[in-house]
Each structure stands twice: as C-alpha cells, then as structure tokens.
Image: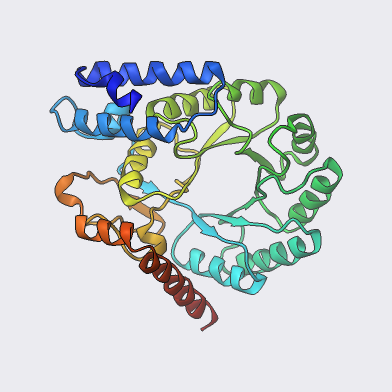
Amino acid sequence: MSLAREIRGLSLEDALNTLRSSEYSEFRREKQVNYGAYLALESAIIHALAHSGKAKCEAEVLGGVYRTEIPVAFTIFLGHPVIMSRRLEEAINSGYKHVKFKIPCNLEELRRVVEALHSMRKQYAGEETVLRADANECFPTFEKAEKALSIMERYSVNIVEQPMPRDRLGDTAKLRKRFHPAIEIMLDESLRKPSDVELFAQMEVADIVNFHPSKLGCLSITREAILKTQELGMKANIGSAFMTDIGFFHYLSLASSIPRLDYPLEEVGLSNFYGYSIVSNPPKITEGYVSLQDINVASLDFYLAEKFKINKIVFFKEQVAHAVKKLLDTVM
C-alpha cells in the first residue's frame, strides 16, 4: 500500500521514475523485499503509458520493438526417463529449439535421464535442439558437481543451470573453467540484485545469467540488467515463474524490447500449462513462437478469474486432469 500511496497523484512518467528510484534504494539496503509488487505496479504504469497515446505498445515504452514473434522454450519436469524423453520428442516435433529439463541430484538417476534425452535428441534432431539442465543448486561440493557435469558432457548437454549453491561462486567458477566450452554455466539463484552481474563477470563464473519474473521487480530494471549483462560479455536468459496470461503478456513486451535476444523466452503462461486462461484471447504457441499481443480490460474474463480464485478444488482438479492427459498422450 505504501508504494501505491507514494505514486498516487503523480504523472505516469513521474510515477515510473519514483517507482524505479524506490526499488534501487531497496537493492542498496539489501533488504528482503517482495519485488513482485514493483513488477505489478510498473507493469500497470507501462500499460497506461502505452494506451495514453505516447507510445504504440508496452515494448516501445520499455525501449523499442525489436521483434513481434517471440521464441519460447519448452520445459520438461522431473519424472521417469522414458516419460521425459517422450516429452522431448513432443517438443522437437512441435518446433521448439530450446528445451529446459529438471534433473535429479542422484548421479545414477541423472545418468539415466540424460542418456534417455540424448538418445531421443539424436534420433529426431541431431544437435539442433539445445538441452539445458536445471540443477537448482543440486550439487553441494565441487567434487560431486564435477562428476555430474562429466556425465552431462558425455551426453552432450549444452547448458547447466545453477549446478552449485548460490553462494558458492568460487567453486562454480572453477567448474565453468573445467568444462568450458563444452558446457555453458547459467546462474539463476545466485542473482539477487542488478549489480550482481558485475561480480559474475569479474569472477568469470557464468556464461549466462537467468532473469526471473519478479526477481528484480520493475521490467525496466530487469531490462537494464540484461543489457548490462550482455555488455559485460555474458548472455542473458529471461526465465519463468507461475504467471497468469496477464503477466505473460507483459513479459512478451520485455522480450520484444531486448535488441539481442540470446535465448527463447522461458515463460509460456498458465494457459499453456493448464488449458484455461483469464483472458479471452490467450497466447498460442505455434512452432515454438508466440506473437506479441496487447491486452486491455475488455480482454479479461472476470467470471473465469473469479471461478479459479475462489474454487481452489476446481483449480487443483484442473491441474490433475491436465497432467493425466499429458501422461496418457505421452504413453500412447
């Protein structure tokens, strides 16, 4: 509420500047803050600016429209190796060029997963499809991380995301040096504030930095951090979180506004996971791409939004039904 009061009565431009200044102050204090509030408020201001006649769309407010067709990535959640390989087959056949997959921390289970995925990729797409393993800080010691990446190198995994705990930057830098250039290291959880990218570059700890929705709050601040990352010689990935299609449309604008998009957008919106949307014209993925779209109040289905907000049992049943359908499609 204090943020909203702070910008109340200001012009849209002044509100945007005040919001950004406030968030940078929080970063300097290194406080634990829910930066999602900044993301929500700034997205609303950017939307209002885009509809005020001062810009043609939200991407233009952020910095420009560099593409209207946004490539997206495909995510495979952890499961049985056979099911995961079938999901990879689905991704390849659907036109995706970048596939992220979750991995187990057990080395033998890891070997079975990456072996199955390597075999499927070799069968369908050769080396054309990028395979990215999301380790989520899985390997606590350099020795275990080295063994894990040796397994993944053997099966041609291209990128490993956050292989070690977020504060183990020294060991992660050693790991990167050990496997460069066969495997690229992406940092995710290690990123906590925009200035961290300068430390990553100084330590030569990462090839890629992952920028999640709401991690750095304001889209404009995230965009600045992405451009700084690229300026420092690293690549940037726009990551994912649990986002409604409203949030997804804002993130499409961010991806559109980046002059050099290093990787496909990881976020795909809830409608592409659970089969329903709170907008009347939900985003559709075609051959691994989503079109840049505008959204307004007329686009919102308030009845559906209220239904899934109140009836959590219905929401849970929808999740289960969607997961079962995916499983049956995979098996058959």
Position of residue 297 measured from the top left corner of the image (x, y, whole percent): 17, 45
Which quadrant of the rendered structure holds the N terminus? top left
Position of residue 16 measured from the top left corner of the image (x, y, whole percent): 30, 21
Q: Is residue 93 left or right of residue 283?
A: right
Q: Residue at x 44, y 49 (%)?
A: 267
Q: Count of labels shown?
A: 0
Q: Residue at x 60, y 24 (%)?
A: 196
The quarter holding residue 175 reads top right
Can residue 121 be seen in the rendering of this structure? yes
The colour scheme used to paint the residues is rainbow
- Tell me: residue 23, above or below residue 319: above
Q: Is residue 108 left or right of residue 212?
A: right
The quarter holding residue 32 reads top right
- Tell me: residue 179, above or below residue 306: above
- Tell me: residue 280, above or below residue 175: below
The quarter holding residue 208 reads top right
Position of residue 180 measured from the top left corner of the image (x, y, whole percent): 74, 39
Q: Residue at x 83, y 41 (%)?
A: 142
Position of residue 135 measured from the top left corner of the image (x, y, whole percent): 67, 49
- Tell me: residue 272, above or below residue 54: below
Can residue 63 be seen in the rendering of this structure? no
